[in-house]
């Protein structure tokens, strides 16, 4: 799930987006195939920010769009934690899954499966 502001900052799009599978770059890296992830009340602020989520509409498959009131459009440069929104924000910070790839580090390898 990704939250992204349109270029003209009139809408925030919340969508299910396919991303390329990351690669192992360091010996301690792992790749987790996510199998479950909740959306908690604390995620709603990151997902929608100051957009008007009560007026959200479905603009395309797998996407909900919420209008951003003009007075708040400047506030969408960063999320509430100071992360830039450029390129979208991946929503959520917890989940459950299976480690499907690991770097060469022994501790990383022990997490496989």
Image (cartoon, rainbow, N blue to C red):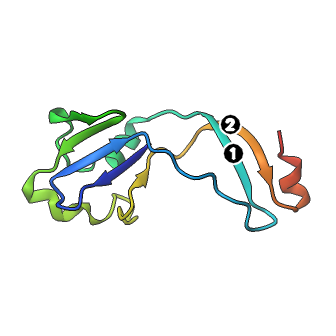
Give the residue displayed 41% in from the left and 54% down from the top.
89
Q: Is residue 62 left or right of residue 75?
A: right
- Whether residue 104 sits left or right of residue 78 in the image: it is right
Q: Percent position (x, y) of residue 111?
A: 83, 46
Helix, strand or loop at disc 1? Answer: strand
The residue nearer to you, when weighing 85 against 42, is: 85
Residue 73 appears left or right of 103? left
Between the C-alphas of marks 1 and 2, the distance is: 6 Å
Residue drawn at x 20%, y 35% is 56
Q: Callout 2: 10 Å neighbours few (<14), some, many (20+)?
A: few
Q: What residue is rendered at 58% in x and 53% in y?
A: 20
Residue 81, image x, y percentages? 39, 60
The picture quadrant where one finds residue 73 is bottom left
Label drawn at residue 32: 1
Which residue is the site of mark 2?
A: 97
Picture quarter with the N terminus? top left
């Amino acid at each position: 799930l990704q939250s992204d502001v349109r270029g003209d900052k009139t809408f925030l799009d919340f969508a299910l987006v396919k991303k390329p599978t990351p690669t192992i770059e360091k010996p301690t890296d792992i790749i987790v195939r996510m199998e479950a992830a909740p959306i908690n009340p604390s995620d709603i602020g990151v997902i929608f920010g100051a957009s008007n989520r009560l007026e959200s509409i479905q603009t395309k498959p797998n996407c909900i769009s919420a209008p951003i009131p003009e007075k708040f459009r400047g506030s969408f440069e960063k999320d509430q934690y100071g992360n830039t929104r450029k390129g979208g924000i991946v929503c959520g910070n917890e989940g459950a899954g299976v480690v499907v790839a690991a770097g060469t580090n022994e501790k990383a390898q022990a997490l496989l499966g």
